[in-house]
Amino acid sequence: MPSIAAGAARVKLCALADIPDAGALEVEHDGDSLVLLRYGLQAYAYLNVCPHAGRPLNWAPGRFLVAHGQLVCASHGAAFKAETGECIGGPCKGTSLRAFPVEIDELQVYLRVEG
C-alpha cells in the first residue's frame, strides 16, 4: 500500500492507471486505509470503514467487491454508490462513507489535504 506524507496542499496517491477501471485500490493516509474507486477518468476516495459496524469494506487486504458502480461491504453486504459514497442497500441504508477529496492531474490521482 502506498503511504501518504501529510502537510501538503495535495499529495499524490497513485497513477490513475494503478486503479483498475471499474475497480478499487487500497492506499494508506495518516494511518487510515482509504479505498480509491475508478470509473474511466474519474476517481473517488473513501475511508475504508463501513458505517454499519466500523469494519473494513474489503474482504482481504487490497481486495474489494465492486459491481455495477457500487462498492459492496464484504462483511454485511451494504452497497455504496461509487460517486457519492451513499449506502443504497443493506444494513446502513441512508448513511454514507467518509469521503476524501481527490483530483486528477496529468493522469495522477492526488488527495487534497488541509495544511
Image (tube, rainbow, N blue to C red):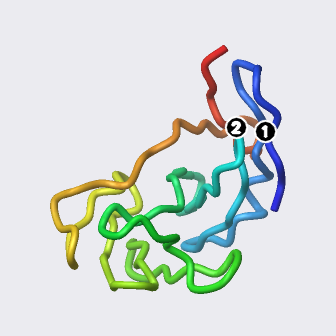
Cα gap from disc 2 to disc 1, whole angstroms: 4 Å
| Of the image marks 2 and 1, the number of the one nearer the N terminus | 1
- Expressed as whole percent of the image width and height from the top left, the position of residue 94 reads 16, 59
The three-letter code of the residue at mark 2 reads Tyr
Residue drawn at x 59%, y 53% is 41
Examine the image and state in which quarter residue 109 appears.
Answer: top right
Q: Is residue 64 left or right of residue 96?
A: right
* Relative horizontal placement of residue 78, taking residue 102 as reference (left or right): left
Quadrant location of the N terminus? bottom right
Q: Are marks 2 and 1 in contact (CB under 8 Å)?
A: yes
Identity of the residue furthest to the left in this view: 94
- Circle on res. 110: 2
Quarter of the image where one finds residue 58: bottom right
Residue 74 in percent (x, y) is at 46, 85
Task: Give the left or right position of residue 5, taking residue 63 as reference.
Answer: right
Q: Give the secondary structure at mark 1.
A: strand
Number of residues whose C-alpha sits closer than 10 Å to that of mark 2, classed few (under 14), some (14–19) or many (20 or more): many
Which residue is the site of mark 1? Answer: 12
Residue at the spot x=70%, y=19% of the render?
Answer: 9
Camera-side residue of 89 and 38: 89
Q: 76 or 102: which is nearer to us?
A: 76
* Image x and y of residue 85, in percent: 36, 56
Establish if 16 lies above or below 75: above
Count neighbours of disc 1 (C-alpha within 10 A) and say few if under 14, some if 14 to 19, many if 20 or more: some
- At label 1, which amino acid type do we have? Lys
Q: Is residue 87 above or below residue 101?
A: below
Query: Looking at the image, which residue is at 35% across and 70% down?
Result: 53
Q: Secondary structure at mark 2?
A: strand
Which quadrant is home to the C terminus? top right
Q: Looking at the image, which is closer to me, 104 or 89?
A: 89
Along the line of sight, the residue nearer the viewer: 38 or 32: 32
Residue 33 has which mark?
none
